[in-house]
Image: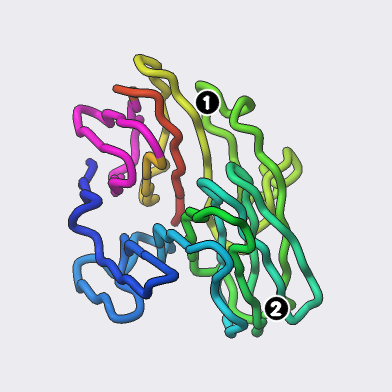
Amino acid sequence: MIEKRAFATLGHADHGWLKARHHFSFANYYDPARVSWGALRVWNDDEIAPNSGFPPHPHQNMEIITYVRSGAITHQDSMGNVGRTEAGDVQVMSAGSGVRHAEYNLEPEVTRIFQIWIEPKRLGGTPGWGAKPFPKGDRSGRFVTLASGFDDEIAAGALPIRADARVLGATLKAGESIDYDLGEGRHGYLVPATGEIEVDGMLLSARDGGALSGGGRFRITARADAELVMVDSE
């Protein structure tokens, strides 16, 4: 089963420096039908103006994954980590018992990101942060696990998160198809960052969301060249 959540129906906010779309209830946007999807709690589609960003602010008990779609984001946190993550790359932060961080666009262009929050398996713990490049060519025609809470996927190169979940990325050429097996009782959430896809007959355009459930195999076919991001969670 797949439920389409069209980009035009998402919650939105315009703060001048930040233009945001919310796939799930967030800040001043509340929709009782879109509070979470399994352990997936937030999927924000953010556009951050040049030389601006999120000043230092706290988090706890959340796994926060940032997928950079264009531009770059510069991270600073209370653990002393500093890093710049570029388009196509991923950073993760396990907020654990509590951390403060800032995310800035120090570039001369708009930076576009997906920020994804997943509820952790356990509360507390020492905070952590990490980032890694994931070349789009390595994801051509297949899903690659970008972040995961499963040991075998971490050993294979995924960034670690403390959740019963994985974040995946793929790129498809027009006409290409891939299958994805969603485990029974699990929740999938699929967004084409670019392009247009069809999932079991349901058309998803760029930045639409597709909520997958019911378990079983889903066939994803690109109607136009597409870049995909998906969360598979409990």
Of residues 168 and 213, which is closer to you in this image?
168
Is 182 or 8 nearer to us in this picture? 8
Look at 22% across and 41% down and name the residue there. Answer: 1
The quarter of the picture where residue 74 lies is: bottom right
Give residue 133's position: percent from left, percent from top: 70, 43
Q: Determine whether the residue tagged by mark 2 lies in a helix, strand or loop.
A: loop
Mark 1 element type: loop
Which residue lies most toward the front here? 108
Name the amino acid type tagged 2: Gly
Residue drawn at point x = 81 percent, y = 76 percent: 80
User: Is the stretch drawn in magenta largely helix, strand or loop?
Assistant: strand
Viewer-proximal residue, 137 or 60?
137
Q: The magenta stretch spans which residues?
A: 194-220
Residue placed furthest toward the right: 80
User: Which residue does the numbered mark 2 point to in the structure image?
Assistant: 125
Which residue is drawn at the image coordinates 21% and 47% (left, top)? 3
The Cα atoms of the two marked residues, 2 and 1, are separated by 34 Å
Reply above or below: 183 against 63: above
Is 234 left, or right, of 214 in this rendering? right
